[in-house]
Image: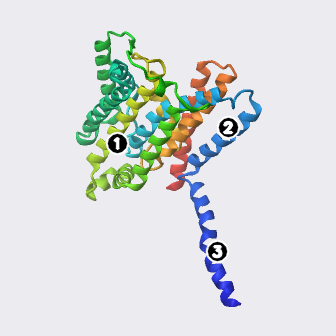
């Protein structure tokens, strides 16, 4: 009888202890903000579906996913730069606009070749900034602002400041849906987030990314590939910024320099609100995706209430400010 009781305890003990340990981790100082945002997303979706007329309609849910996909795609790449301790690339919007112009201009060759050309352009632009930041040790903010100026000026010269209209059809990507309420863009965003999340969580690059973000000097002394890690994070950021531009341009088949006009702040907001530490080394790629979903839901609720765009900007700014303050408080608590 004693043997049976002990064997039963041994069988149930470890599994019983995993759940509390997992929960404790989710609400620890390093994860509480990200966990709270996830919970808020679920609560807001549930309450709004019941309390707000037509919120749960397929058209409105699709609108939320369209907003999440474009901002979130840029944010998950930018999150890699933040995790690496390089703050942000302020060329995200310019890269998205340039890539959108490349995409629309290349639509005559087909949607997929045009998208590949646009994303490749973004990767090259991101890699160029990665060389400046990671190899030459330039300040990421100054380097990315300078890059944004070059990118915008070049795009303006190439287009003459005009709106470019594509010759091909991008409706599958821009307007296509798997079923009502779930657009193709939402699925592509989810797949991209999952792929980048696996890379960061499971690969050597991901481990080096966090270690460089925590202490780049110590990582360099330890022999980690600090320069290559920073370069790769910028490459990801450039590629996803370009992909965001493609998603936006595909909806109308047109592109101009205004495509990424508010993408810089929106992507940064998603990263910080999602719970990624601004100092680097803390957070996950999925946190930025959840931050984008949270902002999309809040923005949609403000639109449903007929509040102006200025109110959305104010709310988004307040969310970022609170996130930075909370991150600072949690950092003090960890120390």
Q: Residue furthest right?
A: 51
202 vs 165: above or below = below
Q: Residue at x 40, y 31 (%)?
A: 243
Q: Earlier in the sequence, mark 1 or mark 2?
A: 2
Q: Secondary structure at mark 3?
A: helix
- Where is residue 265 drawn, in percent x and y? 47, 29
Q: Secondary structure at mark 2?
A: helix
Q: Residue at x 48, y 22 (%)?
A: 251
Q: Looking at the image, is mark 1 or mark 2 nearer the viewer?
A: 2
Residue 2 is labelled as none
Q: Earlier in the sequence, mark 3 or mark 1?
A: 3
Residues under numbered marks 1 and 2 in contact, where contact means CB atoms less than 8 Å apart: no
Q: Quadrant of residue 322?
A: top right
**Which residue is disc 1 drawn over?**
233
Q: How many C-alpha atoms fall within 10 Å of the one at disc 3: few (<14), some, or many (≥20)?
A: few
Residue 251 or residue 89, whichever sits in front: 251
Residue 12 is labelled as 3
**74 displayed left or right of 143:** right
**309 displayed left or right of 121:** right
Q: Residue at x 25, y 36 (%)?
A: 132
Q: Earlier in the sequence, mark 2 or mark 3?
A: 3
Q: Secondary structure at mark 1?
A: helix
- Where is residue 103 drawn, in percent x and y? 36, 23
- Where is residue 162 drawn, in percent x and y? 37, 9
Residue 50 or residue 36, whichever sits in front: 50
Residue 14 or residue 180, whichever sits in front: 180
Residues under numbered marks 2 and 3 in contact, where contact means CB atoms less than 8 Å apart: no
**Which residue is disc 2 drawn over?**
45
Q: Looking at the image, is mark 3 or mark 1 nearer the viewer?
A: 3
- Where is residue 119 drawn, in percent x and y? 34, 31
Disc 3/disc 1 C-alpha distance (Å): 42 Å
């Amino acid at each position: 009888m004693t043997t049976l009781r002990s064997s039963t305890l041994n069988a149930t003990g470890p599994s019983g202890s995993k759940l509390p340990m997992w929960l404790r981790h989710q609400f620890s100082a390093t994860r509480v903000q990200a966990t709270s945002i996830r919970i808020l997303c679920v609560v807001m979706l549930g309450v709004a579906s019941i309390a707000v007329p037509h919120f749960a309609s397929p058209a409105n849910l699709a609108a939320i996913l369209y907003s999440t996909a474009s901002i979130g795609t840029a944010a998950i790449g930018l999150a890699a730069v933040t995790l690496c301790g390089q703050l942000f690339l302020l060329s995200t919007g310019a890269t998205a606009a340039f890539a959108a112009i490349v995409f629309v201009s290349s639509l005559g060759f087909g949607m997929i070749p045009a998208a590949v050309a646009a994303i490749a352009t973004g990767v090259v632009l991101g890699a160029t900034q990665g060389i400046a930041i990671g190899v030459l040790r330039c300040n990421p903010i100054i380097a990315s602002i300078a890059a944004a100026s070059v990118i915008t000026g070049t795009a303006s010269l190439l287009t003459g400041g005009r709106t470019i209209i594509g010759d091909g059809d991008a409706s599958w990507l821009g307007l296509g849906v798997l079923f009502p309420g779930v657009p193709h863009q939402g699925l592509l965003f989810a797949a991209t987030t999952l792929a980048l999340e696996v890379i960061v969580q499971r690969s050597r690059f991901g481990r080096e990314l966090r270690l460089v973000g925590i202490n780049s000097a110590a990582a360099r002394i330890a022999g980690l590939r600090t320069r290559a890690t920073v370069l790769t994070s910028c490459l990801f950021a450039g590629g996803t910024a370009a992909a965001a531009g493609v998603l936006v341009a595909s909806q109308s088949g047109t592109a101009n320099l205004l495509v990424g006009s508010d993408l810089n702040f929106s992507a940064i907001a998603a990263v910080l609100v999602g719970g990624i530490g601004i100092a680097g080394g803390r957070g996950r790629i999925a946190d930025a995706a959840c931050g984008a979903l949270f902002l999309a839901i809040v923005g949609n609720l403000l639109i449903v209430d007929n509040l102006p765009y200025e109110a959305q900007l104010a709310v988004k700014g307040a969310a970022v400010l609170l996130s930075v303050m909370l991150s600072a408080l949690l950092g003090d608590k960890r120390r």
